[in-house]
Amino acid sequence: MVHAQEMQNDYGKIFVSNAVIASIAGLAAMECYGVVGMASQRIKDGIVELLRGEALSKGVEVKNAENGIVIDVYIVVSYGTKISEVAHNIMDKVRYTVEQKLGIPVLAVNVTVQGVKVSD
């Protein structure tokens, strides 16, 4: 079963799948300073899989709640950035972007830092 958000207007119903919401949230997170990439939600043997391109949505989990959605974002940050500031910026950017583009209330954005990337 594909989870989706349903909206009703004068013209009919609109269904937005959680995969679409995850893609929008992933792109918004990648625009934030200090983010190297999205990370897989699961760490295997202490190794983080860095996701890029079309796989960005795999680093985002969307949970349906009664009055909106909760978004979990898994990221890898650049070494030398203040992690708390990067996470706070992602929370603001993801919430704003999803609410503006889709009109769906975002109840919370949870950011999990899965790793730190040292530049080459």
Image: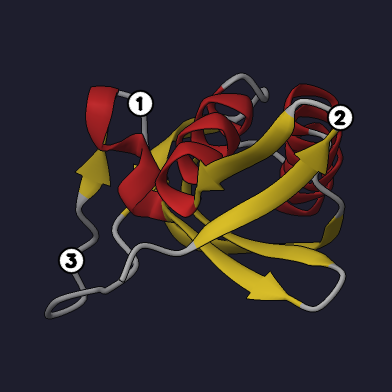
The disc, 1 or 3, on the residue closer to the chain's N-terminal end is 3
Q: Position of residue 97 (x, y in %)?
A: 77, 28
- Would residue 25 appear left or right of 51 to someone viewing this image? right
The residue nearer to you, when weighing 36 against 18, is 18
Picture residue at 79% right of the left edge, 32% below the top: 93
- Measured in 3D between alpha carbons, the distance from the residue under mark 1 to the one under mark 3, in whole angstroms, is 17 Å
> Are the two marked residues, 2 and 3, in contact with CB atoms closer than 8 angstroms?
no
- Measured in 3D between alpha carbons, the distance from the residue under mark 2 to the one under mark 3, in whole angstroms, is 49 Å
Picture residue at 24% right of the left edge, 73% below the top: 43
Q: Secondary structure beneath disc 3?
A: loop
User: Label 1 crowding class (10 Å Cα cut-off): few <14, some 14-19, many 20+?
Assistant: few
| Mark 1: amino acid | Ser
The residue at which mark 3 appears reads as 47
Compared to 50, does 27 lie above or below? Answer: above
Tell me, yes or no, if residue 58 can be seen here.
Answer: yes
The residue at which mark 2 appears reads as 10
Q: Position of residue 114 (x, y in %)?
A: 43, 62
The residue at which mark 1 appears reads as 119
Tell me, yes or no, if residue 117 can be seen here.
Answer: no
| Mark 3: amino acid | Ile
User: Label 3 crowding class (10 Å Cα cut-off): few <14, some 14-19, many 20+?
Assistant: few
Give the quadrant of residue 118: top left
| Mark 2: amino acid | Asp
The residue nearer to you, when weighing 119 against 62, is 62
The disc, 2 or 3, on the residue closer to the chain's N-terminal end is 2
Give the quadrant of residue 48: bottom left
